[in-house]
Image (spheres, coloured by chain):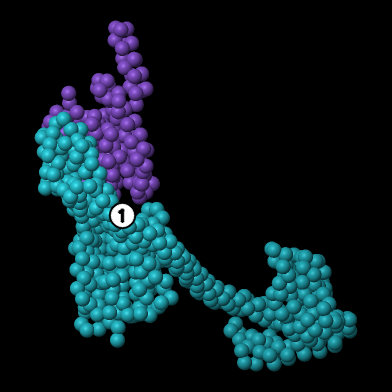
Chain colours: A cyan, B purple
């Protein structure tokens, strides 16, 4: 290349330097225009194009290159999915059709005038012959093209950097979205669970109410029946008979059922003594206290047939009474237990809720030894229904962990003057080190079929509930089993 | 003649009392023993065998303090003298898993849900004891009155045929 007005260096070229780039380029463009206009054979080479005119069509073979003297051109490339994407904007001094000229391939992009454009338009042959016919113009154009290519390379590098930055930002945004989705899912699960518990609470309360009425009716009827029966007994002829019948009745209605060993002992004795009497009858007689039994010497058939039913009527009425009292008790506790959470803020003796919960879970607890240490503690403020949910979770988990046998211990106490604690300990396998962090996460469960309390949300929700009460639920280290501790602030 | 016992196991005395009452009409042929826990039941079984008697039917609750019913029945299976003994589990709240266990491993022959009806429990006990009498090769004549007459008669008939055949 011959030396022109300025000596190009690799780092700063005459037309596109950081400092005087624009003016350098403008000067080069002015030179091109001047040199072209000075050449009579290139008189028609400067052309104008209206906005929207196509200088090149992608895939076309026009065999021309353009050097923009005024205006700008946007290049479009059609993507694999058929979308037409603007890829570059070409300004004055830039070339269009260079790629096709260098490679001989069809046009790589569309080139459309973005505004009225003036350009020097040369077919490939004319451009090639300029080297000989018009060396100064050829040199100017060569310099512009070189700058243009350099600029495009820079632009490509910048684009790569931009893509990397955008990707990083996208990745971050995607992570944030993922987190949000997970949080939403958690919230949804918790809400669903809370809704389920609320529905369950209403159901239980309704059921308890429904059971309460018939249970009360049964209890009242037992009272009437007792009165009626005593009245009938009082009508019996003969004072002695009346008294004896009365004693059978009393020992039935007040009988303290002996344990199986005592019953067996009595039965064995009777079997030995009265081998002629059927065993099924002796079993019934074995329920009688010995002083009442002695009122039927030799188990004389007549007397037994008359008096044993009196004893048994009393005994059965007693069973009905005790059983329906048990139902009523259960109902009362169920009602308290399932008290709707709307009551919100009350002062609560934590031990009441714990006792209610233990009663509700009585069936599940049968398999275990239960150790309670519940001394007087100050009241706390909160929602007893929700706290009951916590006790249920902790106690139920302990039962599940222990399987078929073990010892459950529930203790409470104070920490200083401001806080109380409840500690639930089991003798199950404990929580392995690697799971200790995870057990409070939603959806964590060790139960193979999660059909018990459902969602593996127990501890997550319990922790939330305790946190809402200004307290803390945590797992403590222990040599044996698992130890969960709830700490709550004392009510002001 | 050695006696065939019925053993009832339940931790609630009310339930135990109602089982023995419901089965009272069988007791004159099949004495009933009761136990409030699996451990006590084990001791009662020992006692029955010590006297030279046998256990024909065990009725057992599932949910009990200490060992539960299914575990108790699983262990019974290890005693050869109880091989033919019929085993019935009753319970109000066994889950599906417990039931599968009971059938697969404890060899129970019947499952009764609480609360039951007296005639149903009686029918189950009768049926199971009939099986026991036939399987154990006990002379059925003494039990005709209490058990399934039809099946016992058929059994006797078949036996006689075999004997004459020989």
The reply, left or right, for residue A429 in relation to residue A171 is: left
- Quarter of the picture containing the C terminus of chain B is top left
Q: Nearer the viewer, residue A143 or A235?
A: A235
Q: Tell me if residue B61 comes above or below residue A225 in the rendering.
A: above
Residue B98 on image: x %, y % = 34, 46
Q: Is residue A317 depicted above or below B156 in this figure?
A: below
Residue A434 in sight: no
Q: Quadrant of the N terminus of chain B?
A: top left
> At 53% across and 74% down in the image, what residue appears?
A173
- Of residues B113 and A274, the one nearer the viewer is A274
Task: Name the chain letter of the residue that bears numbered label 1.
Answer: A
Q: Residue at x 77, y 90 (%)?
A: A30
- The spot of residue A144 in percent (x, y) is 71, 82
Question: Exactly how many numbered labels are in the figure?
Answer: 1
Comparing A406 with B34, the one in front is B34
Q: Residue furthest front?
A: A238
Mark 1 Cα-neighbour bin, 10 Å: few <14, some 14–19, many ≥20: few
Q: Secondary structure at mark 1?
A: helix
Can you give x and y, in whole percent of width and height, for residue B49 in the image? Answer: 15, 32
Residue identifier under label 1 = A228
Q: Is residue A346 left or right of residue A128?
A: left
Residue A269 as seen in the image, left or right of residue A477: left
Inspect this view and state whether residue A109 appears: yes
Seen at 73% across and 91% down, the residue is A27
Q: Position of residue B85 (x, y in %)?
A: 26, 31
User: Residue at horizontal 36%, vertical 46%?
Assistant: B115
């Amino acid at each position: 290349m011959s030396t022109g007005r300025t000596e190009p260096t690799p780092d700063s070229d005459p037309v596109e330097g950081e400092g005087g780039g624009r003016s350098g380029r403008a000067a080069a463009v002015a030179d091109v225009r001047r040199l072209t206009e000075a050449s009579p054979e290139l008189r028609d080479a400067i052309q104008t194009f209206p906005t929207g005119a196509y200088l090149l069509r992608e895939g076309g073979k026009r065999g021309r290159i353009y050097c923009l003297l005024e205006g700008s051109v946007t290049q479009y490339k059609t993507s694999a999915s058929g979308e037409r994407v603007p890829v570059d904007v070409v300004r004055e001094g830039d070339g269009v059709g260079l790629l096709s000229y260098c490679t001989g391939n069809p046009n790589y992009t569309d080139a459309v005038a973005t505004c009225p454009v003036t350009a020097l338009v040369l077919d490939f042959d004319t451009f090639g012959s300029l080297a000989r016919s018009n060396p100064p113009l050829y040199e100017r154009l060569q310099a512009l093209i070189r700058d243009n290519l350099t600029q495009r390379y820079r632009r490509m590098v910048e684009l790569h950097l931009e893509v990397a930055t955008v990707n990083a930002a996208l990745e971050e945004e995607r992570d944030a979205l993922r987190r949000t989705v997970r949080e939403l899912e958690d919230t949804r699960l918790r809400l669903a669970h809370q809704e389920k518990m609320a529905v369950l609470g209403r159901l239980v309360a309704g059921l308890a109410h429904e059971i309460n009425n018939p249970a009360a009716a049964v209890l009242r009827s037992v009272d009437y029946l007792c009165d009626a029966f005593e009245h009938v007994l009082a009508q019996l002829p003969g004072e002695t008979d009346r008294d004896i019948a009365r004693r059978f009745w009393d020992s039935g209605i007040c009988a303290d059922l002996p344990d199986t060993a005592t019953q067996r002992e009595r039965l064995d004795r009777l079997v030995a003594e009265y081998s002629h009497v059927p065993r099924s009858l002796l079993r019934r007689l074995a329920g009688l206290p010995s002083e009442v039994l002695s009122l039927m010497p030799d188990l004389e058939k007549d007397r037994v047939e008359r008096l044993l039913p009196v004893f048994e009527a009393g005994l059965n009425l007693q069973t009905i009474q005790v059983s329906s009292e048990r139902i009523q008790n259960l109902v009362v506790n169920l009602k308290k237990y399932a008290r709707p959470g709307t009551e919100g803020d009350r002062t609560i003796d934590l031990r009441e809720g714990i006792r209610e919960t233990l009663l509700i879970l009585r069936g599940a607890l049968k398999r275990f030894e239960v150790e309670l240490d519940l001394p007087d503690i100050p009241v706390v403020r909160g929602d007893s229904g929700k706290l009951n949910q916590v006790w249920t979770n902790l106690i139920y988990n302990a039962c599940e962990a222990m399987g078929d046998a073990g010892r459950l211990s529930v203790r409470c106490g104070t920490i200083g003057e401001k806080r109380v604690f409840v500690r639930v300990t089991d003798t199950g396998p404990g929580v392995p080190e690697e799971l200790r962090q995870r057990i409070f996460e939603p959806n964590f469960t060790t139960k193979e079929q999660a059909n018990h309390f459902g969602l593996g949300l127990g501890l997550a929700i319990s922790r939330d509930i305790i946190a809402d009460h200004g307290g803390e639920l945590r797992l403590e280290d222990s040599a044996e089993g698992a130890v969960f501790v709830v700490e709550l602030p004392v009510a002001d | 003649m050695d006696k065939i016992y019925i053993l009832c196991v339940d931790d609630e005395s009310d339930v135990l009392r109602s089982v023995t009452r419901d089965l009272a009409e069988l007791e004159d042929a099949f004495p009933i023993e009761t136990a409030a826990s699996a451990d006590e039941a084990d001791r009662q079984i020992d006692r029955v065998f010590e006297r030279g008697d046998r256990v024909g039917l065990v009725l057992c609750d599932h949910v009990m303090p200490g060992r539960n019913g299914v575990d108790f029945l699983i262990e019974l299976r290890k005693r050869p003298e109880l091989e033919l003994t019929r085993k019935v589990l009753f319970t109000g709240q066994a889950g599906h898993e417990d039931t599968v266990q009971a059938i697969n491993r404890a060899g129970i022959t019947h499952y009764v849900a609480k609360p039951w009806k007296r005639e149903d429990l009686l029918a189950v006990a009768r049926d199971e004891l009939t099986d026991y009498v036939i399987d154990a090769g006990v002379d059925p004549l003494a039990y005709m009155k209490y058990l399934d007459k039809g099946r016992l008669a058929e059994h006797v008939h078949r036996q006689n045929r075999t004997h004459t055949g020989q």
